Amino acid sequence: MEQSIYRSHILVCGGTGCVSSGCKQAQDALKDELAKHDLTSEIKIVETGCHGFCEKGPIMIMYPEGVFYCELTPEDMPELVEEHILKGRTVERLLYTEPNSKKSIPSYEEIDFYKKQQRLVLGNCGHMDPESIEEYIATGGYEAIGKALTEMTPEGVIEEVKDAGLRGRGGGGFPTGLKWQFAAGAKSDKKYVICNADEGDPGAFMDRSLLEGDPHRIIEGMMIGAYATGADEGYVYVRAEYPLAIERLQKALDDAREYGLLGENIFGTDFNFDLHIKAGAGAFVCGEETALMNSIEGKRGMPRPRPPFPAEQGLWGKPSNINNVESYANVPNIIRDGAEAYKAIGTEGSKGTKVFALTGKINNTGLAEVPMGITMKEIIYDIGGGISDGNKFKAVQIGGPSGGCLPEELLDLPVDYDSLIEVGAMMGSGGLVVMDDSTCMVDVARFFLNFTQSESCGKCTPCREGTKRMLEILNRITSGEGKDGDIEMLERLAENIKSTSLCGLGQTAPNPVLSTLKYFRHEYEAHIYDEICPAGACEDMLKGYVIDEDACIGCTACARVCPVDAIEGNVKEAHVIDLDKCISCGACVSKCKFDAISQA
Amino acid sequence: MKSLEELRKLREKAQKDIQARKTSNKPKVIIGMGTCGIAAGAREILKAVMAEINKRNLDVIVTQTGCIGMCEKEPLLDVQMPGKDRITYGNLTTDDVSKIVVEHIVNGKVVEDLAVAKLED
């Protein structure tokens, strides 16, 4: 029986996160199982992009019921097909279990992780086949470019984007409409639009997920940008480390060409446009716009002074408009639904939504799209499910290596571009690294500085040499050899590097040091003057642990977990740690219920 | 792509392919797929329902349920129109399916002689 309608669609997540957790194997097992029961003509398997809830992958959603199954293995498939597909019974044990109430939740809209989200940009991700242009069109795709080309002038498009208040999602927060206006105003026979998909911040993966889960949205956003600025050619600069994103984008480009959505006389107008993919070799500095354009031209990825800005002289000396993936992804909604609808979401200065990548010591690792102005507390506790292993929150690092660390007292801060700058951080691309009380803030600063230091292109001396000197000081402090004056020297170097570097990399590289100095200065001081790492994370500084005789009740819990038998003592008598044997692993500290153990 | 019209036509066609993912406000057919139902031929009924829906180009949710205790009357099939009572049809053969689809889903009239129960919404 030839069938055009399937009675059920099974949406299987095929984002990189789920691939790592084994979605391919689960999907193969599902296919086998469906074939075994002769169901292949009734049930359609759709491989989608990322659902964002990577912590719980592999994920499947079963339609028409809309049941959400997670953490699936190939071994679960026989039961899933037999029970859910054949008999129509929900498989309780494979549903998502809410960690606090222990209740299983069948529908994903009911899950806390999704409840506070507003998925506009990520709306299609996880809910459609990213390799099907038809499915994108079915959700209203390419309507916006059609509307722009046939009903709006380029100036009208720019006005709409300006009115919507869209700001650059790559981190800087520059008004997108204004950027377009500059490029549109440049006189030239040739112009380019470029999409910056060189996502390099540790922990950020929203651009990858968008390209993997909804590539046509990016193409459409770029087409609208090209029409507005007068460009007829575009480049997507994407990291070579994102093979799946490149593959899906390539498929999307091929399909769009076949449908005449790329090429000449699009929608019967005189608008011509085509796009190329340029795979970057993974240098962090190539996320800087002028370095990125050098890289496309085949030159070494190094920034150059601005002005001239790319809008005047960009790629191959021609006026160019460059935006981030997420910025372009916002554009089709603005044009299709109008600026009014768009700016109803967000705060005074930051409109719309922002996608955050939640990583670190948090229960729900994943991607969350939230309205601007939501508090950090809501993101970390309501959506992120709080700190993992029952530990205590210490800080959240926002904005990647260019951003800053925010302490607990700033958790109620409404998140938008301006509020973050005010407290010494920045939106950045939206990576959130959550840290608990076992994290040493000096070590965190050292980690990020180590990253920017190795990624510095070397063009500007302050960035090249200054970050190196700062890193040396931080290495000294974390190995217990800090000395008086180190903090002041770090601050002086930081200010110099910030004010004398050409590009964003150098200008922001000291931020992690400055923000940790601002909020966690006592930790630096403890390292230097008390020779103690309060978090117990800097291994070189650990001299073992001691037990406070008065606080110890002799419960023996510590002695039982000690891997080297360094703890001795009789039951109900105070215990003693042999410092010669102690390896400073800290296992006893986490077991002690009486706070009796501290660093020697 | 030559015009918005062309895009919209394409969209209508494409939407049909993903209609199974829209879950609200649609007629629903529920087929009893307990062991009793399967033994009595529920799979054939389900296939006939799918064929009929395809033939008539309808947007209907087809789902299944387990044994509801009326094993004697299997195969059982329920039809629930949006906002209406859920009607159970029993002792079905594949030939009855077309009648139920046309009368109940298309025209909104309960097929009284095949109905065995009514569950109020």
Image (tube, helix red, strand yellow):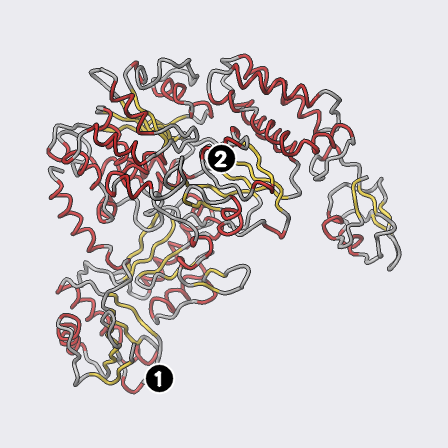
Location of residue A62 with respect to A277 vertically, above or below: below
Q: What residue type is labelled 2?
A: Ser
Residue B60: % across, % down: 22, 65
Secondary structure beneath dot 2 equals: helix
Q: Is residue A175 left or right of residue A251?
A: right
Secondary structure beneath dot 1 equals: loop
Q: Which residue position is annotated with label 2?
A: A419
Q: In this view of the protein, can residue A113 be seen by the observer?
A: yes
The one nearer the camera, A187 or A298, is A187
Q: Which corner quadrant of the image does residue B46 belong to?
A: bottom left
Location of residue A341 with respect to B101 vertically, above or below: above
Location of residue A578 with respect to A170 vertically, above or below: below
Residue A201: % across, % down: 48, 32
Q: In this view, does A107 lie to the left or right of A574?
A: left
Q: What residue type is labelled 1?
A: Gly
Q: Which residue position is annotated with label 1?
A: B69
Q: In which quarter of the image is the C terminus of chain B?
A: bottom left
Q: In this view, does A3 lie to the left or right of A66?
A: left
Q: Which residue is at 28% across, 21% downward?
A: A183
**Disc 2 to disc 1, C-alpha distance:** 61 Å
**Chain of the residue under the numbered disc 1 shown in the image:** B
Sort mark 2 into few (<14), some (14-19) or many (20+) by Cα contacts within 10 Å. Answer: some
Residue A447: % across, % down: 60, 30
**Chain of the residue under the numbered disc 2 shown in the image:** A
Q: Which corner quadrant of the image does residue B42 belong to?
A: bottom left
The one nearer the camera, A48 or B119, is B119
